[in-house]
Image: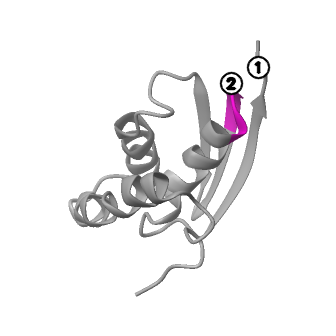
């Protein structure tokens, strides 16, 4: 089964995202809040872990804010939360500032 949202990513990125989907669904079934699930997904992703990212959740809408060093990290942050059950829209306001 193909997912058009991940087709444009590199094979390594696609595997990193797809491998987390089952875990994220299990977390959602355990009664965690959507905000907790988003924080957890970002913390588990080695490309964005440790970045100072702010998350705003309003019902099923998530806004990501903060600063990362590459556009790749910005995209991975967004894609790592896309598959969480309950996230219907993502607004990615992360800024890319490379030094």
Which span of residues is magenta-colored?
A: 65-71
Judge the density around disc 1: few (<14), some (14-19), many (≥20) Cα neighbours within 10 Å.
Answer: few
Viewer-closest of 43 and 60: 43
Residue 88 location in percent, x, y? 59, 70
Q: Quadrant of the N terminus?
A: bottom left
The answer to which quarter of the image holds residue 7 is bottom right
Residue 69 location in percent, x, y? 68, 24
Residue at figure coordinates x 30%, y 62% from the top left: 28
Q: Is residue 63 above or below residue 47?
A: below
Q: Quadrant of the C terminus?
A: top right
Q: Earlier in the sequence, mark 2 or mark 1?
A: 2
Q: Looking at the image, which residue sits at the far front?
A: 11
Mark 2 sits on what residue?
A: 69
Give the structural element (helix, strand or loop) at label 2.
loop
- Disc number at residue 98? 1
Residue at figure coordinates x 25%, y 59% from the top left: 23
């Amino acid at each position: 089964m193909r997912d058009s949202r991940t087709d444009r990513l590199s094979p390594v990125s696609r595997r990193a995202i797809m491998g987390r989907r089952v875990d994220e669904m299990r977390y959602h079934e355990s009664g965690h809040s959507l905000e907790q699930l988003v924080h957890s997904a970002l913390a588990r992703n080695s490309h964005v872990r440790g970045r100072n990212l702010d998350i705003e959740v309003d019902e099923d809408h998530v806004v990501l804010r903060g600063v990362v060093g590459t556009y790749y990290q910005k995209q991975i942050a967004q894609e790592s939360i896309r598959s969480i059950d309950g996230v219907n829209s993502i607004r990615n306001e992360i800024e890319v500032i490379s030094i």
